[in-house]
Image: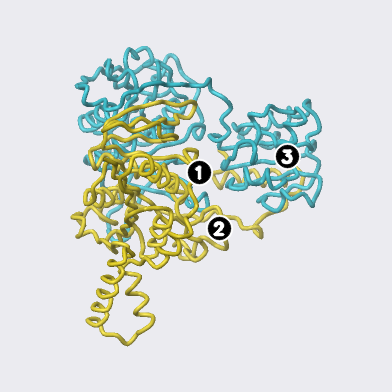
Chain colours: A yellow, B cyan
Amino acid sequence: MGYNCVVLVKQVPDTKRITGKVMNDDGTVNRAALAAIFNPEDLNALEMALQIKGLYGGTVTAITMGLPSAAEVLREALYRGSDRAILITDPRAAASDTLATSYILSCAVRNVPYDIVLCGRQAIDGDTAQVGPQVAQKLGITQITYVEALEGLQGRSITVRRNIGNGWQLVRTNLPVLMTVIDSANQPRIPAAKRLMRYKKARARCEIEAQLRLERPQLEQGELAELVEQAAKELSSRGLLIEQWDIDMIGADPALCGRSGSPTKVHRIQSVILSAKDSKTVEPTDAGISQMISELISDRIIA
Amino acid sequence: MINTNQKADVWVFAEQHNGHLEDVSLELLGKARALAAQLNVAVGAVLLGQQVSSLSQRLISHGADKVLLADHPLLAHYQTNSYAKVFCQLVRKYQPQIVLFGATVTGRDLAPRIASELRAGLTADCTDLQIGDHKPPNEDKLYKGLLFQIRPAFGGNIIATIINYQRWPQMATVREGVMRMADPNPRRKGRVIKVDVELGPEDLPLEILQEHQQPRKVNLKAARIIVAGGAGVGSKENFKLIWELANCLGGAPAGSRAAVDLGFIDHQYQVGQTGTTVRPALYIAIGISGAIQHRAGMEQSQKIVAINKDPQAPIFSIAHYKIVADLNDVVPRMIKALKEKATR
């Protein structure tokens, strides 16, 4: 008995607390100006998975795709109660749009046992809410979006309440299912101190390697690989290894990943942030007000 | 994914529930009409449901040249799989170049499922759509007449223009209220094309046990522009200024907690920690001092205009445009300026 839950999580820039200039002069995003956090609604998805495990038993696996630094959100998932953590990191996955991302994530999910796939409704960096439904389509399973409450599970049947904007809907379906969870669904638990102490040492291979390179820059490639392997084995024996997969290991077609797998392309990016020093004092005259309105029109704020 | 075809139609998903069309679909038809005129192609409205053919003329009067009507008992209630299946069949058959959806709960559930199946690009929550040309950095070819999908990203800190030049259809969602609804022309003519629907029980994996819909309340979250008044407005009478300015901008009126407590405006219009948290494109704070509880509910707005007599008011610390003056003088000037721009 019990259910295998897979939670798809994302590390995102904290768009609510942006400091300094978000865009570099060359038009790329200045990551240094952005603190990285666990996408808020993914915490609600993780909480729901942990509640399912608490009520019915089973497992919780957290999967993320991202840079090596995204291992941090997996550690946070382990602190909160996740049983297993998997990092998909591969340079060939860079610049994936939602379609390529959902393809890669669906390939990863196929490699773990699952009854229920959960993710936050949307991530705060893009706010698209597209990856959940797209993963469900690629897995060929039923999707339930905007889930605000878990009513219960019985055998292979699940009942949840969806928020439909101006009301709610109580729906039932058979597993497997993918659900996207909204922030009002629950209050994510805070990490347990005991788990935090235990899992703060959890590492992915890429992190072990980076640490070794830093500590011993003179190491040769072969030696380095051997040491990484040793350390990984040691961590794994203590249940502290964050699994690290590349797109070959999940059987993904490279042509469908990254830039080549992404139908949407960026034509142009414009920075619109006004930091406090960019604020303007408008003279309370017809000319001053007219000038402000012209600026708002040219900035596409008003039509 | 379908081939690019410059002669193909521009489509809008005509979202209806229980025979009631969503406003956003009508707004999109107006935009689709403008895009189609530039491309010199037709606008198609895709209408799925049961016994909904009576909605066709309304779609035509708002800009559709043709209505693709899929009428079937199994389409009576929206479900992701059944709607996506029928929609994908239609796209494969008729090969539209652009497909637009309202960014409603239903649109955001359906559009990505369809895009994934078609392996097409999809851009969420566009704030503007235009037609333009693009030259990829590594190619000599100029791709003409593409859909520019313009949207904020990174919490509204950047504006990105997204395109899909190789794989079509070009798909986008747009939030309600972003596009202006055009006045309907009841004399407009269009064709209704009834399409065949093949669905079985296996296409309806959800059992809808219960549904509850409140009558539509004030939805500040969906508003792109919010004009909010505070205690400084002085009276319920004077709050008319707030409504008038909101009306001029096509925005929603709102109030601070102080304005609500003073009875100037109803609680459902309250912005702030104990009211609604909003992040519109434009927030105009009028006679609001800007207590932290209020700022927490609106400081993520893309642009903030603050009007207050007190130069020390905390609202100015987060305002992009500061107007230190009497609101009774400034607001009428703003209304006048907006009316002048509109007639130009």
Q: How crowded is mark 3: few (under 14 residues within 10 Å), some or many (20 or more)?
A: many
Quadrant that contains the C terminus of chain B: top right
Q: Residue at x 21, y 56 (%)?
A: A250
Q: Which residue is drawn at 25% across and 61% down?
A: A246
Estimate the spatial distance between the alpha carbons at disc 2 and disc 1, rounded to whole Å. Answer: 24 Å
**Residue with the mark numbered 2:** A18
Say left or right for A115 vs A210.
left
**Residue with the mark numbered 3:** B286
Say left or right for B178 vs B263.
left
**Residue with the mark numbered 1:** A187
Q: What residue type is labelled 2?
A: Ile
Which is more toward the observer, B20 or A209?
A: A209
Estimate the spatial distance between the alpha carbons at disc 3 and disc 1, rounded to whole Å. Answer: 34 Å
Q: Is mark 1 on a helix, strand or loop?
A: loop
Q: Which amino acid does label 1 sit on?
A: Gln
Q: Is mark 2 on a helix, strand or loop?
A: loop
Q: Of marks 2 and 1, which one's residue comes earlier in the chain? A: 2
Q: Which residue is drawn at 52% across and 21% down?
A: B214
Q: Which chain carries label 1?
A: A
Which is more toward the observer, A244 or B133?
A: A244
Q: Which amino acid does label 3 sit on?
A: Ile
Q: In this picture, is B82 found above or below A35?
A: above
